[in-house]
Amino acid sequence: ILSSIAYGIDAKPEDILIEGIEHISQTDIEFANDFDYVIKLLGIASKVGTGVEIRVHPTMIPKESMIAKVDGVMNAVMLKGDCVGETLYYGAGAGGNATASAVISDIIDIVRGNGSPMLGYKKPLESGLSLLSKDEISTHYYLRMSVEDKKGVLAQITNLLSHLDISIESMLQKPDDDKDESVELLFTTHETKEQKIIFAMNELEKMSVVRGKVMMIRIEK
């Protein structure tokens, strides 16, 4: 709804990348903390050229960012402009009183006959804007995988990522407490396309040295 208001496009839920928090592990939280990130479930809308990127998913964000400090029942909307920089609108978005207030406000509007366009806009703010596909998303990424603890494994994985033109920003190796003779490799990448990362994850999972699924979290800086 907010991205429709901001950019004047009709964005349908089925066309938007939407992920929940069910795959986030304690290892991910600890890695984020060690590298000065926190993990938040964010809805992100951004104008990229003549396209609009809209997505909802868990995101690693720097601890010092304003939105990283939003906790509990509090919600926030952050806007970023070329001249004004970042502005934050912050308040209670869950819990009994906050939810009841919003519901009662809607009921009062209905009783009074107040109305507005369904998505809050009457016509596109800019002509020619279109919703970008999920493959066209471009950001930084965090990858976690369990691999065999033997010589040459790290080189195989980094060679694959390099071959796919994915640049590694940082890497950490940790013992895998759940599996014998395995270690967990944790990577963050420089900015790259979603399509490249998904393809890389599929290729990594085909490698005999990689055990199980490769997990990914997007990063916003």
Image (spheres, grey):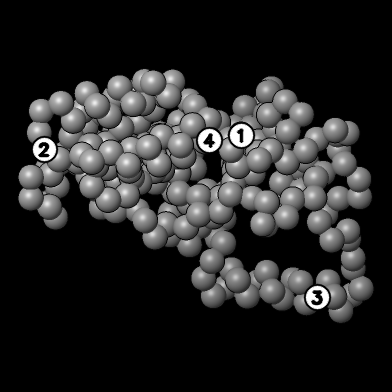
Residue 76, can we see it? no
Point out residue 200 in the picture as x, y percentages from the top left corner. 41, 34
Check disc 1 and report its element: helix, strand or loop.
helix
Identified by mark 1, the residue type is Glu
Q: Are marks 1 and 4 in contact (CB under 8 Å)?
A: yes
Identified by mark 3, the residue type is Ile
Residue 22 left/right relative to 9: left
Point out residue 31 in the picture as x, y percentages from the top left corner. 26, 40
Residue 201 left/right relative to 152: right
Identified by mark 4, the residue type is Gln
Between residues 21 and 137, which one lies in front from this camera angle? 137
Check disc 2 and report its element: helix, strand or loop.
loop
Q: Are marks 2 and 1 in contact (CB under 8 Å)?
A: no
CA distance for labels 3 and 4: 46 Å
- Residue receiving disc 1: 136
CA distance for labels 4 and 2: 29 Å
Mark 3 vs mark 2: give the one in front.
2
- Residue receiving disc 3: 108
- Residue receiving disc 2: 149
Looking at the image, is mark 3 or mark 4 earlier in the sequence?
3
Check disc 3 and report its element: helix, strand or loop.
helix
Looking at the image, is mark 2 or mark 1 earlier in the sequence?
1
Looking at the image, is mark 3 or mark 1 earlier in the sequence?
3
CA distance for labels 3 and 1: 42 Å
Residue 53 left/right relative to 166: right
Vertical arrangement, residue 203 with respect to residue 92, above or below: above
- Residue receiving disc 4: 195
- The label on residue 19 is none
CA distance for labels 1 and 4: 7 Å
